[in-house]
Structure formats: structure tokens, C-alpha cells
Image (cartoon, rainbow, N blue to C red):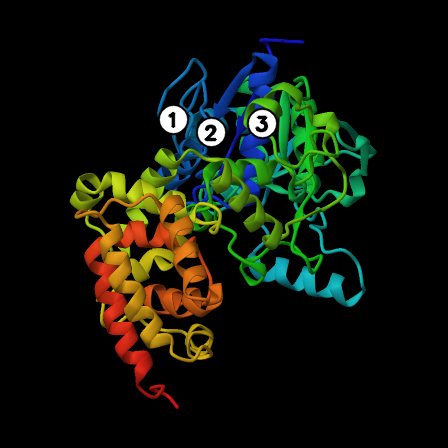
Amino acid sequence: MSDKNIRLRFAPSPTGQLHIGGARTALFNWAYARRMGGSMVLRIEDTDPIRSKKEYEVAILDGLKRMGMDWDEGPDVGGPFGPYRQTERFERYLGVAASLFQAGWAYRCFCSSERLVELREAQMERKENPRYDGCCKDLPKEAADARVAAGERAVLRFSVPEGQTTFTDLIRGEVTFQNTEVDDWIMVRADGAPTYNFVVVVDDSDMEITHVMRGEEHLTNTPKQVLIFRALGLDVPLYAHLPLMLGKDGKKLSKRTGDTALQDYLDLGYPPEAVLNFLCLQGWALDGENDIFSIEELVKNFTPESVAKGGSIFDPEKFKWMAGEYVRRDSVERLAERCGPYMTAAGLMTREELVERNEWFLRAVKVEQERFSLYSELPGRLAYLFAGDGDVEWDQKAEQGARKHEGGAAILADFATWLASQFDGGDAVDPGALGAATKEWIGERGLKIPGLFQPLRCVLTGAAGGADLFEIIGLLGHEKTLARIAAGAARLAEEPRNA
Ligand code: GLU
């Protein structure tokens, strides 16, 4: 099924980094636009002059692009319904506000902020919902004109009619609000700035948006917006309010329950494909069986109707697990390319070294591929390879394991002599063949495998577990391997340092 007239939008406010909830909203809009062969619009809602910042706009666009999303119209690519930044559309909004005022849908309100605070407090005391009491609603036109002429400042309030407001939500069905629940809200502030609930309608209508898919936190804004559409005699778009993303504590996702900015996850080295896949699962499922699927599958199958109503639980452990799954499935080349900057940031390899020693680095990545989940974890896992051969840090468990075997130092020294002959002059070893030969060597001497492997692993890596020992020997190369064994054997022959 396709319908090129379908138009969706993502409308972030550039007041902070792109939140993962926002990234999910963008993703679902984008997926549906692409599925239907319709259009995706990016609109910047920068009406808040204090909190909006250009750098956030840049960061949001960048984050979306890094996730592989694109848009057909937007502030950076233009389009037939521009401009796509709200601050560039004020004239249009004020024109529409004037026509609503002329038609009697809006009135000027002169109430001071002191009066509004008192009103609010009194209502709260009476346990009523705070709302504007309509004090200025019936001011005669001449009186209001005179007050404006005398320099008094007024806001423009929408005059909410009696009755109820019903709209279609593709996830929830028909949604009805009693108009008594909707305040006579401010459309234009005293300084002439139009507000969100008003401008969003002008834009959604001007930009011919057919589907408004956004977070559930906007559900209570929707009756306000629908009333404006109707007052203007315009078609109301279809809505889809995506379930809130909740932390494991069942509360709204916040810094407290983990990182909430998309950028933080990307900076930590969550594979972008894993981020996309995980976001898909926040309120949506492919088939209830497969959690791991590609973005193409999302595009092929996504409909707003198939989104769940209930709050989705954002599970950080599952997210990390998924990151690992994507690391496992990636090609070594791409993984190395993506992990390289983390190696440089950790001071382990310069950018030049990453190029010069590319083959070595590819091997190192392959050796660890099964064992890490985030790109930022790789430097920590490989750090031992870059340590000075005499000062590899031994963790307690590794050292205890190594010292358990009597004569470990002597076995290591023996092994080193034999190993030197296996290198065949260069660094190249075949880890599989070396492993088999080593096991024979162990057997011939009547030793047990751990009797060599535990001390060896300790002196080479300082850890009790990890990658295949012979892969590690391959990565360290001839000289370093022998130097580490020599230094480690000497240390093992001494008393433990922290004993
Ligand atoms: N600018 C709003 C926000 O960032 C979105 C408004 C909408 O989608 O209608 O939450």
C-alpha cells in the first residue's frame, strides 16, 4: 500500500540534545513516511527564544542523520512549504491570529500576572483545576480598544466553545475531551509572540500534514489544536500519540534512570543500528518473536495502528545486550573503523597508527569481537597489549591463579625457550597450530594445561580470562611475548607484591 499524499513531520524544539524519546518519534514518522511513499518534513519549533539554541538544532539534525534518517523538506533542504523554522514564520502566524480574532474566536485579555496568580491560588484552595475564569472574555470591543490605545498590553486568548472535542487517534481510537477541561489558553503573548499550540496548527495545516505522530505527553494539547483547526474551517489531521517511554521503575524516563540524550548513547559507542532497533521496540514489535530486525523491516511493516497504547519500558540491560548482538554481527572492517576513534581518544593508537597497523588492529578487533558490546569498551579490553612488558598490571584473580601452580616460573622459562623456536624468525604465528603444538609440549612434560595456561595468561595479559591465548601471542608478537614471559616469570619467582 502506498499513498504519496501522506505527509508526516518531526518537529523538535531545539532546546536541548535530541532525547531518545524524540529520536523514536522521528524514527516512527520517518518509517511510516517511507513505507507509504509519502513525504517526511522536518520542522524546527524554536518559538521559545530563551531556551532555543542554534547549536541544539545542529546537534538534532546531526543525530538524526547519524541514525540514517533523512527528510524531504526541512530548514536545511528547503521545500515548497518553507520556511521550516517557526521563528521565520511569525508574520504568517500573526495574520492567522488576526483572522481568528476578527471572527470572534479569540479575545484580548488584560489580566495582570498578579491577578492570575491569585486566581490560581484560590482555585487550588477550592480543589478546582486551575484555569482562566474568562474575566476579559466579554469586555466590549470599544473598551478593549481604548485600553490598547492607552498603551495597556494584552494577550490574545482562544475562546473555547462549549461542548466537547473529539478526534481520531490511530493508536487509541476516538478520543474525547470535555471543553470545560480546556482553558481559554493564550495564543499570542503580550510581547506579540505566538505560542506552541497555536503555531503548530498553522504549520501542520500550511505544510499539509496528514498524520501527527508524537509523544503521549502532547495528548492534552491535542484538543486545543483541534479546536483551532475547526475554528479555521480546516481538515483535522489524524493523530497518533506514542506511549511514554518509562524507566524500569515505571516512571517517566529521566537522567535518573540513565542517559536520555541520543548523543550520549552514540558517544558511548552503542552501534547506531542497535540504537535504531532498540528504539523500534519502544512501543512497537515486529512479530512478537524477533527482537532483532533491520530498519528495512521496520519500514516494511510499520503502521501507527500497530503501536501499543501502554507505556513502554526502557530496559538499559536489554539495550546493552542488543548493542553486543550488533557488535557480534558486524564486519570486522566496519567495527574497526568505528572503534578506531575510541582507541585514539584512549591514547592507545594515533590515527596514523590505525592506518599503518590496520591489519594488526583488524586482528585485535576480531579477537575481541565476541566480548564487548560498546565501541568504548574496546580500548579497555585491548589496553594490556600496549602496556610496557615489565609492567603489565596483574589482577588479583589472575595472580592467584598463576601462583597456585608450583614451579610456575620455571615452567614459563622452559616454555619461552621452546616458544622462541616456534616463531620461525618473524612475528607470524598460526594461533591454531601453536595451540596444538603447545598442548603436545605440555603432554610431553607430564604437565596439566592450567599449569602453563594460568601463569602464561597472567604474565601476558594480567587477567584471569579473555581471548584465546594463542591469538594473544599472535597479537603481541615474538619479542613482546618473550619479554613479558621473562619479566613475569621473574615476578612469579618473587613473593607476591601485595602479600
Ligand atoms: N516541538 C514539540 C516538542 O519538541 C513537538 C510538537 C509536536 O510534535 O506537535 O515536543
Residue 338 relative to residue 165: left or right: left
Going from N to C along the chain, the mark reached first, 2 or 1, is 2
Answer above or below: position of 62 versus 115.
above
Spatial separation of the CA atoms under disc 1 and disc 3: 17 Å
Q: Nearer the viewer, residue 414 or 48?
A: 414
Q: Nearer the viewer, mark 3 or mark 2?
A: 3
Residue 27 picture quarter: top right
SS at mark 1 in the image: loop
Q: Residue at x 60, y 17 (%)?
A: 35
Q: Residue at x 38, y 75 (%)?
A: 408
Check disc 2 and report the residue beneath it.
43
Spatial separation of the CA atoms under disc 2 and disc 1: 7 Å
Check disc 1 and report the residue beneath it.
75
Q: Residue at x 38, y 39 (%)?
A: 335
Q: Amino acid at mark 3?
A: Asn
Residue 388 relative to residue 19: left or right: left
SS at mark 3 in the image: helix
Q: Residues within 10 Å of mark 3 (few under 14, many from 20)?
A: many
- Residue behind label 1 places its C-beta within 8 angstroms of ligand 1: no
Q: Amino acid at mark 1?
A: Pro
- Residue behind label 2 places its C-beta within 8 angstroms of ligand 1: no
Q: Amino acid at mark 2?
A: Arg
Check disc 3 and report the residue beneath it.
29
Q: Nearer the viewer, residue 105 or 480?
A: 480
The image shows residue 483 at horizontal and vertical percentages of: 21, 65
Asked whether the beta carbons under mark 1 and mark 3 sit within 8 Å of each other, the answer is no
Residue 476 picture quarter: bottom left
The image shows residue 270 at horizontal and vertical percentages of: 46, 46
The image shows residue 18 at horizontal and vertical percentages of: 47, 43
SS at mark 2 in the image: loop
